[in-house]
Amino acid sequence: MRTLILKSASSYLLPVLLLFSVFILLRGHYLPGGGFVGGLVAAIAFVLDAFSNGLDKTKVVLKVHPGFLMPLGLLIAFLSGITPILFSDLPLMTGLWADDPIPVIGALGSALFFDLGVYLVVIGASLTIIFTISESA
Amino acid sequence: MTNDIIILPLVIHLFFSIVLMFFWRQVNIQKIVSVVGNFVALVLAIWIFIGVYSQGILVVESGNWPAPFGIVFVGDMLAVTLVLLTAIAGFAVSIFSTISVIKARLRFGYFSVFHFLLLGLNGAFLTGDVFNLYVWFEIIIISSFVLISIGGEKNQLEGAVKYFALNFFASMIFLTALGVLYGLVGTLNMADIALKIKDVDNTTLVEISAVLFLVGFGIKSAIFPLYFWLPASYHTPPSAVSAIFAGLLTKVGVYALIRIFTLIYGGDAFLSTLLLALAIMTIFSGGVGAIIQNNIKKVFMYFIICHIGFMIGGLALYTEIALAGVIFYLIHDIVIKTNLFLISGVIYRIKSTTNMKKLGGLYANYPKLSLLMAIPLFSLVGIPPLSGFWPKISLILASFNAQEYWFFAALIFGSLITLIVIAKLWSEVFWKNQPKIKFPKKFIYFDQLRMGQKLTFIFPIAFLTFVTLYIGFGAEHIQQVSQRIATELMNNDSYINAVFKR
């Protein structure tokens, strides 16, 4: 599938899709979106890149093994869950929110970090599956 | 902060499974981290047990949402006792896994998934929300499916498919029951359901939901007509995995039955009759199954089924003495069944087979080890003063008081058949001379191991045997705990009041 059109398009699509996935990630919580969908969009960006430029080049772009993103994401989500126990004497998974919203990002809370964790886990899991299948195929 | 301690077993196991994932390829580091993690979990479980024992029921409202709306975690005596037993079994099995499971299997995240399984078990014991219970069951199924199929041998995959298909089906029935119940009472919090179910007019539908729960949990805990997946799957994975399955997975089903049928459907006459009939049949079919088997792993598997009947029957009697007996039996059974499968793992390592016909002469060659193995075997039979004896007194007394003579007879039958089978096993495996068989050359025998490796094999068994001995000789303490749990279960007001902070 290494056509010229796909190849030139994908070099533009990769950053655009990644940016879009971050937008979806931040849009979540009150509006449709969030870590899961965002993670899937980001995974699609890399899969498209792998289709047009080959798997090896995508791995170079990705820099880390996708399997590494799974525990990393889980760790971030886990930390966002136990932060209320550690720092403010509240039960597990209580939502903590900053007082003032930050421009562009919006209201900052522990839910965002949980979503960030989900985002990384989804990228890691889906890319690991797809890469493994395409390597053995 | 004090209430938060009951959530710590979940936090610890999740934390360690994440840490283990970072060391995906370094199996040797994983071994150390997992044993350390399980040790920490054991210490925490003891701490929590003492905390709940002295302070009464502890409740955590996760996310700080008030009780009927958010998910609550309730640490009552029953839950924390089971958390403690899970920690004991988990600690023993994690040490046993470091030596008995081959590296090719450990490479695929064995320990990480093992901690996820323990996370699911602890979650199921601690949660106070029925839907959350379903979620923990899913976590248990997924991680146990991975554990049972790691290694990918043919018979393993066959067992895994049977295991997964039937347990998944059970989850579906459980979910259906949940849906019916939610439609009736409009809440998922167990304490809230217990309050509201008394006002439901449509008793037929309540009974239907109860029967659906019974079928769902019945498959998971392997009671009479629904146990066929268990003998088909439990012997296929390595002994360490079988041990944790035998000790804890079916017991989660029993726990769920106890919780649902005491808290929500307390003492329903129709259900009691049904449960009692099922219990008698379970004892009978498990016992008869055990007597015809020649593979010691399979014998132990049928014992799991047989002894589940003791607990279900005690639950059906629904008196305080019977429930105390059930809880005592549960405590005894988790430790003993885990230990039996570890023992079968060591016998396999010594003789390269678990077939009774090919085994023999163990006592002549390993007298000390045989005596160590004798303690759990005789505890299983219930020879006084070992641990199996005490709960049977309560159960037999309760069945006699309730004039349920069929169950009384089934208890006697179950104990007798256990005695016969263990006597047969003892004479075949330990006393008989070693029959002439071909020992495979390419096999690492127990004798070829270094001293440290041998000790790693023996230590978990010795540890669990020590716990069994404590349950037997310190029966007074265990009986006190069981009585207290039984009282709490019979008067569920304390549970409900604790959840709603009244």
Image (cartoon, coloured by chain):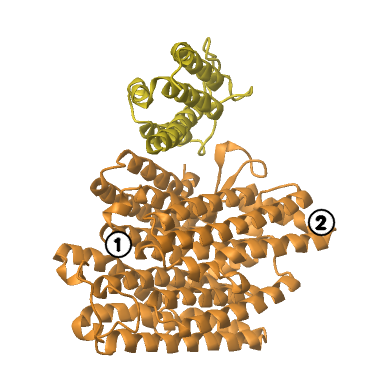
Q: Mark 1 belongs to which amino acid?
A: Phe
Q: Position of residue A49 (x, y in %)?
A: 43, 20
**In terms of sequence position, does the residue under pointer 2 or pointer 1 come before the other?**
1
Q: Are marks 2 and 1 in contact (CB under 8 Å)?
A: no
Q: Tell me what residue is drawn at x 54 percent, y 19 percent.
A: A26
Q: Chain of mark 2?
A: B
Q: Position of residue B42 (x, y in %)?
A: 36, 56
Q: Residue at x 54, y 30 (%)?
A: A36
Query: Is residue A88 found left or right of B34 in the rendered image?
Result: right
Which kind of residue does numbered mark 2 sit on?
Answer: Val
Q: Is residue B450 left or right of residue B96?
A: left
Mark drawn on residue B96? 1
- Give the chain of mark 1: B
Residue A21, image x and y in percent?
52, 20
**Residue A61 occupies which quadrant of the picture?**
top left
* Numbered circles on residues, count: 2
